[in-house]
Amino acid sequence: MLYIDIEKSFPDFKLAAQFEGENEVVALLGASGCGKSLTLKCIAGIEQPDRGRIVINNEVVFDSEKRVNIPPQKRNVGYLFQNYALFPTMTVWNNIACVIKKPKNQRREIVDEILQKFQLEDVKNLRPRQISGGQQQRAALARILVLEPKILLLDEPFSALDTHLKWHMEQEIASVLAEFHGTTVFVSHNRDEVYRLSNQIAIMSNGKIESTGAKQAVFDSPKTLAAALMTGCKNISKAEKIDDFHVKAIDWGVALKTGHRVPDNVKYVGVRAHHLKLASGAGDDVNVFSCRIHKIIDEPFERIFIVSFNGQNTLQLELPKDICGEIDSHELALFVPPDKIMCLE
Amino acid sequence: MDFRPFTISVQVAFLATCVTFLLGLAAANFVYKMKRGKGVIDTIFTLPMILPPTVAGFFLLLTFGRNGFIGRLLEPFGVSVVFSLSGAVIASIFVSFPLMYRTARGAFEQIDPNIIHAAETLGFSKFKIFWLIKVPMAKAGILAGTVLAFARALGEFGATIMLAGNIPGRTQTMSIAVFSAVSAGNRDVAYMWVAILSMMSFVMIMLMNRWGAGDKKSG
């Protein structure tokens, strides 16, 4: 279990992070430089927050009011660094052996066992720079898990890997996470990884946790601009409320009917590229607009159309290839399904 | 032919390097970890490298002399640093310290901070981090610094002659012997010491380069 509510100020940046996790995978999703890694460092005790409280498995590890600040050595946090941070002067075997505080013969057994589990026996006498990125990550994971940490912190674990390894390592980490019974905080800027690996999502933007929630809810109906952007929404416009079920999309220069009630504090509307449709032409003219096509991008299984209603501000829509045949190359009739319109703060 | 300057020089340089090694490492680690006031401390630690050796010697004389702050502390024990071998060692430590300190600090700063952080989260004490992680990772720099410090101590002249004087058989090192021989018109002796000192310096630079290159391959 993890509870965190902290603040830390820098001359040009302010971190304000609060979220909790109950033995599940919490993803911190945000653009680079938004304070995700700093949050992990505060949990691990590498950085000290100015104010706040951090609780790990019912143990208070940081409390600015009670002046509690347990050093990283005593927090028993498993921290997987982006570049794995293996000790370059030691072999794989020594990297793992040196963290175990047990008599020599017991230590040998433990190391051999974990090396076997992570398929590292063949490279145990090599140094980190002599093994592949995937092996380095496994070695770093083995070194962390051998200490039976209370929580796991994963800092962009796949960003340093080649595409073909990424998928493989993601499966391995997924199985490690399935076996691990504590809370995991998983930091990433990749919505697909986050969706596949986590249960809870906290969206972070400019040092602040903007919204938290169950994975599906955050992806289905993001509440803020940052949440919509981070979950991959391509079409966003400034907006003004017209009435309870109509909103004006300022950048697009159109009024839209919405399926859900428009909140009073709406600032933006968004609609995902794959939710946009071609108008069927059968009478229904709500949310149907004639669009100019600016560009067509061919993807393996779909086509992306960059279109605009009337002005300069473009929208992007993704259509399956089999229905693209009907479209001429200059114009299309676009249908924006009312229930897919997301009103954002 | 008097070979005592060689023995004295090597003795002084060796003892001085031992002390400089530990002091320089400790100072490098201290400044590396500092968060505020780094600039001031760094300047103070580097100063002996820039100061004219005679000025350094003068400061040392003021500190270790009979009326000096440390000299007075040592007097009851009958220890006098001035005009003694220990004076030569102290002068060499003083001038070689910045070389060790700066090279080691530079090597520490090359280490990816995440490796240190990882060691902390894995439960390593500060002591263990220093000896098991930082020193092995900074090995090439530390070796280079040690060789530089030894070479500097071996060739030390100005501060040594100010503090330890030029007493043949007691404090006369090779570089001081060169000076003495030249001023006495004793060219042959001067040639010999110059040849020995030049060769030793050459070998040390070779060693330093080889260790530096070797480390890149293996480690």
Image (cartoon, rainbow, N blue to C red):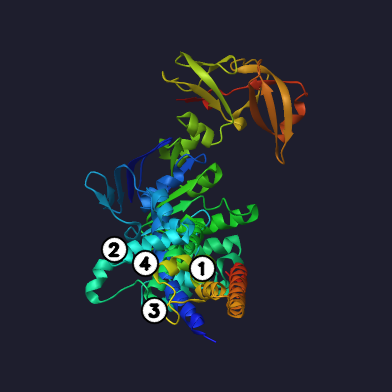
Do the residues at pointers 4 and 3 share their chain? no
Tell me which residue sits at (32%, 56%) in the image. A71
Residue at point 42%, 49% (across, down): B39
Which residue is labeled 3 in the image?
Answer: A106
Name the residue type under label 4: Phe
Determine which quarter of the picture holds residue A210.
top left
Residue B113 position within the rendered picture, expressed as x and y whole percent measured from the top left: 47, 55
Q: Is residue B8 above or below residue A189?
A: below
Q: How crowded is the residue under tag 2: few (<14 C-alpha within 10 Å), some, or many (20+)?
A: some
Q: Nearer the viewer, mark 1 or mark 2?
A: 2
Mark 3 and mark 1: Cα distance apart in space: 48 Å
Residue carrying label 1: B152
State which chain disc 1 sits on. Answer: B
Which residue position holds label 2?
A: B68
Q: Is residue B119 above or below residue A54?
A: below
Question: Which callout, 2 or 4, points at the residue further toward the start of the chain?
Answer: 2
Question: As rendered, which of A281 and A62 lies closer to the eye?
Answer: A62
Figure check: B95 above or below A225: below
**CA–CA distance between discs 2 and 4?**
35 Å
Q: Residues within 10 Å of mark 3 (few under 14, many from 20)?
A: few
Q: Is residue B128 above or below residue B7?
A: above
Q: Nearer the viewer, mark 3 or mark 1?
A: 1
Question: B95 or A336: nearer the eye?
Answer: B95
Question: What residue lies at 46% left-to-right and 53% top-to-bottom?
Answer: A154
